Amino acid sequence: MDEKLTSYTKFSGCGAKLGPALLDKALCGLKQPEYANLISDFSTSDDAGIYKVSDEIALVQTVDFFPPIVDDPYIFGQITAANALSDVYAMGGKPVTALSMVCFPKDKAPIETLRKMMEGGLSKLIEAETALVGGHSIEDEELKFGFSITGTVHPDKVLYNNTPGKNEKLILTKPLGTGIINTALRGGIASKQSIEAFIDSMRTLNKTAAELLSGYNVSSCTDVTGFGLIGHACEMTARGSIGMKIYSDRLELLPDVKEYAQMGLIPAGTYRNRDYRQKFVKNHEEINRTVMDLLFDPQTSGGLLFTVDENQADEICRKMKGRGVAAHIIGETTPTEGIEIIG
Amino acid sequence: MKKSIDGRSLPCPQPVIKVKQAFDEGGFGELEILVDNKAAVENITRFAENSGHSILSVSEKSNISTIVIENLANEATTLPETDTTEIIMGSNPGVSNIFINSSTIGSGEQKLGDKLMEAFIYSLTEMDKKPKHILFMNSGVKVTVEGSVSLENLRDLEKSGVTLLVCGACLDYYGIKDKLEVGKVSNMYEITSILTSDSNTVTVG
């Protein structure tokens, strides 16, 4: 393909998301009235907002958009949709409607590019049985694309990200390393197999994983995205009463990720994530640097990260693997505060 | 001889890529790199340390960092710093890489050559000190495809932490890419990087 979608952005592989420290500064102390039906808002850094409309139904609402991370517009569309839908799945919800949003450099890119991005996004919305109801587009020098998704959930069955319990295992449903492969891709040295695995992982919906959660005692759930595995684990343990051990040797990585990490192909977002959150890792000074780089690697359209009764962990992993989900037990909850890296 | 790279205003990850390219080309004793962001400093530091080169200095002045790296590529005694997560090889590091460039060992009778290759790969599984990489090129790639008698032994090696890299162009040439059973498809660039950066290699074939 001649067209290179990534040439329409200056964020060449090092992440466009505002760093967690900066975001905290902007949001800290921001207040709104206490609405009776508002279940979850921005103050708890959960994956989506929850608003109760009846005793049986609550809305799950989220938005996510970003500059291209692959060159093929159809695949980019698929990834943005999978990524946006994921927040609804992570809250235990079922996505129902979507709005697209696009910032498009109309003088640089042919309009067919937008068409292909829409087709890619729509293919994933259809897979998720989610209706595209509209959207908004503006002209911009920098291409960006994404979706706002609305889902529904029973108000008592919301999966929060910060309510893990005691004696539970931590499970992750996709391999790590999309930030590093993206950086290697920008550097022109990513292998074909790593690019293929990276694309497949990012455009895979978390739908199947989410559907399988409902039969088990899952106490908390989130999806791993820009803040990296540890960043999201920190949000899960933010209440302080429960901590986590993460087994670094059991993490599944995308192909060649470790080699690229050792070559220094680390996105800047990793360092921002680490600088902000390494203080929550009790033994961070003893951890090998490559391992830390992997733990803080910002993910695009990452897997679900959830805690489940330790007696059900093996079974749920087995079930997920049987349905093609790369689920692994990667840690456990602890009765003491903070995160500890083992292995 | 000293070489300089101006990595200022280059988008990530271009500074570290330029440094890697400079070391791949070689021909200098010291490399000085100017960069204007912290991520580039961290990336270049990681590259240098993991590829066995030594950082002589890192200095910062009005947001411009200068990194000086000594090129130790020609000193055969220099080993790259191994990760603690890598296989621990003991005090004697053993052989890092095995470069297999034929499906048989030696150039006598083919039957004997096949047997020797099979026995060699089996013997590797029995060694305490395993190599880090086994690189397959030319007809050596046939050892990794469907029908090879060595597949189980190669899988064992992979399980014990050995990385198997198979030349993709060679698989293509022999028309057996879809028959690959074990190892990762690699390219000349990656294989050359390993052969030239890691400590020692034994060629078999």
Image: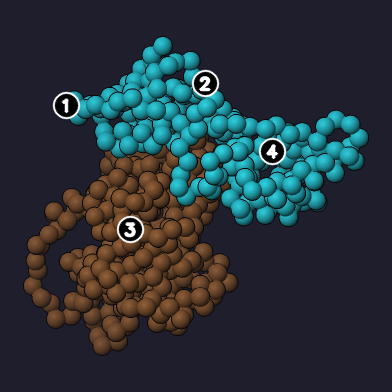
What residue is at 29 percent from the left and 74 percent from the top? Answer: A335
The front one of B117 and B189 is: B117
What residue is at 82 percent from the left and 41 percent from the top? Answer: B116
Mark 1, other Cα within 10 Å: few <14 / some 14–19 / many ≥20: few
Chain B visual colour? cyan
Label 1 lies in what chain?
Answer: B
Dot 2 corresponds to which residue?
B74
Label 3 lies in what chain?
Answer: A
What residue is at 43 percent from the left and 16 percent from the top? Answer: B29
Dot 3 corresponds to which residue?
A230
B148 up-or-down from A185: above or below? below
What residue is at 62 percent from the left and 37 percent from the top? Answer: B95
Whether residue A175 sits left or right of residue A98 in the image: it is right
The figure's colour scheme reads by chain
Note whether residue B106 is visible.
Answer: yes
The front one of B39 and A112 is: B39
Whether residue B41 sits left or right of residue A110 in the image: it is left
Q: Amino acid at mark 3?
A: Ile
Q: Amino acid at mark 4?
A: Phe
User: Which of disc 1 and disc 2 is earlier in sequence?
Assistant: 1
Dot 1 corresponds to which residue?
B62
Distance in Å between CA atoms under marks 2 and 4: 25 Å
Residue A269 point in image, percent of width and height? 31, 46
Note whether residue A99 is visible.
Answer: no
Distance in Å between CA atoms under marks 2 and 3: 39 Å
Chain A visual colour? brown
Disc 2 versus disc 3: nearer the observer: 2
Dot 4 corresponds to which residue?
B136
